[in-house]
Amino acid sequence: MADRNDKMTYSYDEAPPTEREKEAEIVEMEQERKEEEFETLDGDELTRLRDLNSKVWKYYKRAKESRRKFDWEWMVRELYVRGYHFARYNRGTNTITFATRTGVRIPINLTWAHLRAVRNQVTSFRPKWEVMPNVTTESAIENARYSGKILDYVHKKSQVKRKLKEVLTDALLKSIGIWEITMDDNKNIVINATDPFDLYIDPNCITSDINDPEWGAMYVVKTFSKPIDEIKNDPKYKNTWQITTGDNEDATAEYKRFMLQVVRWKTASRQQDDDSKMLYEAWFREYQDDGTYKLRVVTTAEGCEFPIRNELTDEKNYPWEVMQGDISPNSLYGESWAKHVIPINRVMDALESHIFEYNHFYARGRYVIDKNSGVRIIVNQHGQIIEKNRGSTVTSLPINPLPSAPQMQIQNFRTYLEDISGAHDVSLGRLPTGIRSGTGIAELRQADATNQDDLVDNLEDFMTRTGSRILELISRNWTTSKLITTTGLGGQPEYFMAIGDRASKMRKKKEYTFGSMRLPLAVIGSDFEVNVQVGSWLAYTKEARQEKLKELYRLGAIDQETLLMHLEFGDIEGIMQRTRTERLLDMRANRPSASLERMGVPEEMTDEELALAENELMMEGKEQPVEPDDDHEVHLSVHREHINDPEFGELIRAHMNEHVSLQKWISQAPQIPPQGMEGESGAAPGGAAPAPGGAPMDEQQMIADMLAGGNQMPAENAPGNVLPPVIRLPRGIPDVGGGTPPLPM
């Protein structure tokens, strides 16, 4: 309405217009707008728009009528779980009565407790996405790994853990839960839970995958309320001159409106300053000449002759994914988990109410008195005094003790409730009688988990379709690179750039410069296979899971990283690095330094002791040489302790680069058989063993020749100019240039 408000300006010299004059001016402006929008349309186009508008109402009414029975059941169940156990609907007055004065009513909300237990049992293993490539090329495997990290990024940013619980709650109460997966203006994935009351799905749909080409939905109608000002200012809506007044409705489903009056204290009509309009947005398949179909989106409202939105999209999939709460062959809507639990809870409510009423009467007593006996009770500092007329009789009526049948029936119904809901003592946080060991508790937890297999399978299918939908949106809409931050092992942040595979100009790049950082570039496609597994290959309690992990690690079935990750350690990479360093130093603890022996140093020192001495000197600012026959792995492990020193870290990193460069040069240098060696295998006559120090004979001979005379390798023996790319080396070995390689961290 910005353009309309711009035209409605008045001078201070003029008298302000009256409300009637303002309304007349608005009507005139809307008429001008109507003429501008329709002046280019012919009669056939107007007829087509009317037909599309009529199609929306036809689809909506058909789906609404077929779902009316389920709407009533959904309202009853949701009110019950919210604690309104004695609510009654009066069809004569179209109202809901929540309490009566005809007796004591005690609501025992066991349905909510069991629903919470089942929901938490299903999500206790944090279901997440896993992406597998369809081909085995190196680039496909790498991009699949980054696609999995992007789904982890969406999982955290979109608060999927909470929204999973929301969709499971709807699935347990209403037999279906719904997510809407869209992308906002900033190209971020948005996941929102949609109330099943507000989404009308084709009644002929017989599968939870509403995007299935054969058995899915031909149309879906979403209803939602929106302020009129927002509708008129939204550029995707046209013909908004048709909307002049609001309806101020909260929902289109009749029984949802009743429920909102209760749980949100909504009145029949809201304040006039909150002027809103209910919109009806239909998505339906429109088949093309080549046999394929696209989705058309048509939006209208009450009182509109023409749709306010009419768009033929390139989409083939609806933006919604549906999860079923139970198995209902050839039907989208099922009976729901709550339908079978609530009747048992009603019986327990009645039994507990009767027991409470009995205890109330038993405590207060029952009396028989003569009529007009003048009985009254006086309570003072002496206690309670009963006063009566002389000659009248007042006697206490004996009350028989409560029989054991109600308690036994309550216990039976509690057992029925646990069996039907699939949540027993251990899932509800209670230790069963006689069970104290962790193994026994784990077995009971596993038995309860088996009862949820149908729900778990449906959740896996639902999450798999959702993950594929997210990757499809990213593949099509991320035409420019986007920085992704994920949390790696040990809580370390990991950064990379991602782009959709439709952005062809950057698909061949493998790196991207972001400020001063060079980050890997991941190309995200929609042709990956997404898997979700809910459950555990270990155990169902933390203690049993830890013991199983330790056993698998001892057997060699899993590695150290997997063990630490599932034991929930922090800084896993640091722990593994320190473990490797300690193991390396232990293996070479008693081996004297080859470089010191060559130099004739009388005192025996290991490479570890030499590296520690070098650390002390470098921490004083003194540069230290790197010898070719140093144990470079040991030196790098020891020097790494001071690599981040604020004053001398740069000196230590340069020293480590020399170790890395020389180590790389030795490993890549050509094979040089020493004099007197025969045979293709390069073995010395008589099977001479390699020289001390661990390097093969050719490397030892090469280092000896280099140290003896400082001669360069002949050109024919050094293809590609394979020489150590270091800044400073002993014995006059030249530098090939090109800088130093990065340090292995």
Image (cartoon, grey):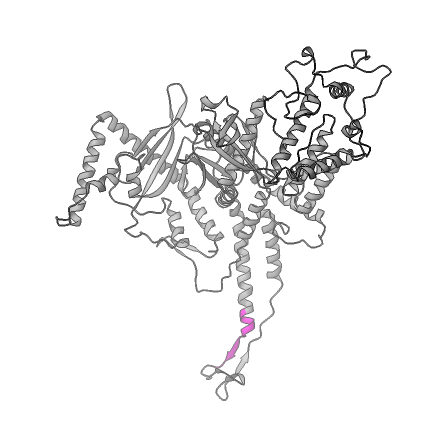
Does the magenta portion include 540?
no
The relative height of residue 101 versus residue 415 in the rendered view (above or below) is below
341 or 578, which is in the foreground? 578
**Residue 462, visible in the rendered structure:** no
What residue is rendered at 81% in x and 25% in y?
Answer: 692
* Rendered-image quadrant of the N terminus: top left
Q: Nearer the viewer, residue 716 or 522?
A: 716
At 16% from the left and 45% from the top, the residue drawn is 10
Residue projecting furthest to the bottom: 390
Compare residues 89 and 535 and report the one nearer the observer: 535
Residue 155, x across and y down, in percent: 52, 39
Q: Which residues are magenta?
A: 360-370
Measured from the top left, where is residue 610 in percent x and y?
74, 35
Q: Residue at x 72, y 27 (%)?
A: 627
Q: Quadrant of the rendered structure where residue 583 is?
A: top right
Residue 613 at x, y percent in the picture? 72, 37
Answer with left or right where residue 7 lies relative to residue 590: left
Q: Is residue 736 left or right of residue 300?
A: right
* Residue 582 place in picture, x, y as percent: 73, 38
Q: Tell me where residue 433 sits by quadrant.
A: bottom right
At horizontal 29% and vertical 46% (from top left) the residue drawn is: 247
The C terminus sits in image quarter? top right
